[in-house]
Each structure stands twice: as structure tokens, then as C-alpha cells.
Amino acid sequence: VDYANDLNSKRFGSGFEHDPESSWNLNKLHTQPRSLLKEIQCDIQGVTHPWTYLGSLFTSFCWHTEDHFLYSINYMHKGHGKTWYGIPSTSAEQFEKAMKGFMPERFKKSPDLLYQLVSLLSPSFCLEQGVEVFHTVQKEGEFIVTFPNAYHGGFSHGLNCAEAVNFATPEWLAFGSQAMDKYHNKKGAGAGGLRGGKRSDIFAHDQLLYHLGSKLSKIVLRNKEKLAGKRESPSDLHVAIKEALARDLPYNPAKFVGSLLREYNRSARMELHLRKWLMHDLRVPVMEKVTYPNADPPLCCVCKCMPYFSYVVCRNCVKVTCPHHAFAQCDCKADAKVLALVVSDKGISSMENFIQSVKKSCNFQVLSTTTTTNGAKADPAPAP
């Protein structure tokens, strides 16, 4: 069955070119105010810019989740309908169990089978295994949105043309970290090093977190004149920062900053733990103030992640890994390795402390003014 999938819309054309200013133009989705993907600061075809799909009768897309567990949006420009089956993230684990139970020998040979987009499984069988499955038919002029870690698959009813792209909102942050855990299966320094990666990163997750922290910093700097007069009063300063964030962020500041701090802390603490292991315990030589070629983090040759804060190079083998897999790439000794630091310890910790202080401002509350026993008004006090 003929199926032209994953066509570069920049090269072959986009169906939204006739109305480029439309709010529904998928080519512009990553630049919208609520989009987190614009902080990646690079173009990724199929993620920040749409892919085009030309389907025919019974062309299928196999069960899969989106890269990094991102959201996706698919628009049908023209043609016959398309059947979609969707499984919510709450049933993802049960679905994977059903798949592995149905074809155990295939999974023994290819543990990453679910990431190859080559497997179909009857929705009826999934239902029998206790998996929640939902069904719809997409028609011309309709959008389909898939949610993080939601498996989906389906087929076309005839000739059609569609476009699809990914997007991320603040609610996605925790799912992105879950995807990293699932893809790379890292369990402590030096552990699990030979298991390899199930799926390659398409952008550096830690880089996105760091850039989101920088976004908060830029908001504070833009308002530095307004904040300057509040520094003598901590409560006034917290209120001023909270107001600036509410004005300049297009989403709930408290929820966003809370999620960002949780995920950034997780990454930062693991990075600093691995650095201590490499630098102090194993005495791996260090190279500081390193930049990435073309600003793109390399892929770890073991787990296929994109390390952002630092990476390790073996001078003998000229192989690159993340800090976690420094000794899984080869048998060379520690003095043959180099730990290349892109972001310093101080830079990592300073960003963590900054996000923590912004979170404190977001959660700051002022009690209503009260009257003292002598009739004077008491100063507002911060809520405990």
C-alpha cells in the first residue's frame, strides 16, 4: 500500500501556505505564547515544523507515542477519512504488557520494538486485556490532538492529505522527564551502563529546562527598574516579582514554576552527583567552558540521550557519552577520559537557587491589613 509519510513541509510544501496568518497554522504553533518548544531555539522537522502525510486506502500508522511524550496535533486537509485508535496514558503500561504478551519472541529479539513503529495489535485484543481504547474517525477539515504518553494508531479510508506537528505546554514537563527515564533507563552512577538506549533524543531535555529557567530570569531583568525600589522590603519584592510573572507569563506562574523547579532539581542533582563520582572518586580529567559544535548537544553512544550540562570523551576511542555512561563506552582507564563541562557547577546551582526564589515569590501571600489594640493599622504579614 502506497503511503508518503513524514514529508518535509518546508521542502514539499504546507497546506497552510494559503493562509499563513491563520491562528491554526501548524507552522507557527511552536512560536505561540504558551509553547515551550520555542525555548529549544532550533528547528526540528516534525516537531517544531509539521510533516505532511499523503495516505491511500488502508495505509496505516502503527501504535506509538510521540517523541519525548509530546502532545501532537494532526489536521486533515483533503480526502477520505482516517480511523484513529487512542489509549490514554493511564493505560499505557497495560498496553505495553499486552503487546509483549502477544508477541514475546519478537520482544526478546527487539526490546525496543515499540519504538520502531512497525507493530499493529487489534484494539479488540487490547480491550480484552483491560486496556482502555478510544475510537474516532477524522474527516476533512478536522483536527486530532494526542496527549502525552498516549499510544495511538490507525489507518486511512482512501486518498487523503494531512499535516501534523508536536507541541508542549507547561503540563507536559513531568511527562518529558518520564520519557527520558523510559528511553535511557538510568539507575544511578555506573549502573545499567551496558543496556543501551531504547530511543534517541531529538532535543536535549535538560537544555530545555535550563532555557526555561533563563526565560524567568529575563522576565525579572526586564522588570529590574520596578523591582529596584522594592529590595528593602522582602515582602514588597516578592509581590512585585509575582505581579511581573503574572503579567509576562502566558500561563499560571505558580504551577509552571513549581513544575519547572521539580524537574530541574531532579536533573541538576543527578548531574552534580555524577560529576562528583567522575571528578573526585575516579579522578577523570576536566575541561571547562566547553561549547557544543553548532550549538547541538551530541548523542551518547550508549544510551542515545543528548547530554547538555556535560559530556565525556574518550581520547583513545574518540567516543562521546553522557556522564552516566563514561565507562560503558570502552575499557579505557579514567586518565583517557575527559569530562567536558558546558555549564559549571556554579551555573547549575545558581539556576536552581534562582528558580527556587521565584517559586517562593509565586507562592507568597499577604494577609489582609489588621488593626492593633491602639487603633493603628498593622503591617501586612506573609502567610506561613
Image (cartoon, helix red, strand yellow):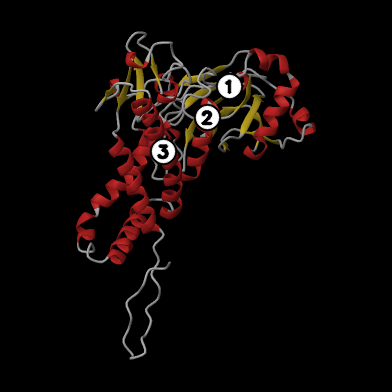
Residue appearing at x 54%, y 32% in the figure? 74
- Secondary structure, mark 1, is helix
Q: Specify whether 57 is left or right of 115.
A: right
Give the amino acid at mark 1. Tyr
Q: Residue furthest front?
A: 281
Q: Specify whether 121 is left or right of 152.
A: right
Q: Is residue 81 visible in this depiction of the protein?
A: no
Q: CA distance from mark 1 to mark 2?
A: 21 Å
Residue appearing at x 52%, y 17% in the figure? 194
For label 1, the residue is 115
The residue lying toward the viewer, choosing from 173 and 10, is: 173
Q: Residue 292, located in which quarter of the rendered image?
A: top left
Residue 282, relative to residue 145: is it above or below?
Answer: above
Q: Residue 235, located in which quarter of the rendered image?
A: bottom left
Mark 1 or mark 2: whose residue is earlier in sequence: 1
Mark 3 or mark 1: whose residue is earlier in sequence: 1
Image position, residue 14 (x, y; %): 44, 26
Residue appearing at x 38%, y 27% in the figure? 281
Residue 152, relative to residue 354: is it above or below?
Answer: above
**Quadrant location of the N terminus?**
top right
Give the amino acid at mark 3. Arg
Give the amino acid at mark 2. Lys
Numbered mark located on residue 201 in the image: none
For label 2, the residue is 187
- Secondary structure, mark 3, is helix
Other residues around mark 2 within 10 Å, as few (<14) / some (14–19) / many (≥20): few
For label 3, the residue is 269
The residue lying toward the viewer, choosing from 75 and 354, is: 354
Image position, residue 225 (x, y; %): 19, 57
Q: Is residue 221 visible in this depiction of the protein?
A: yes
Q: CA distance from mark 3 to mark 1?
A: 29 Å
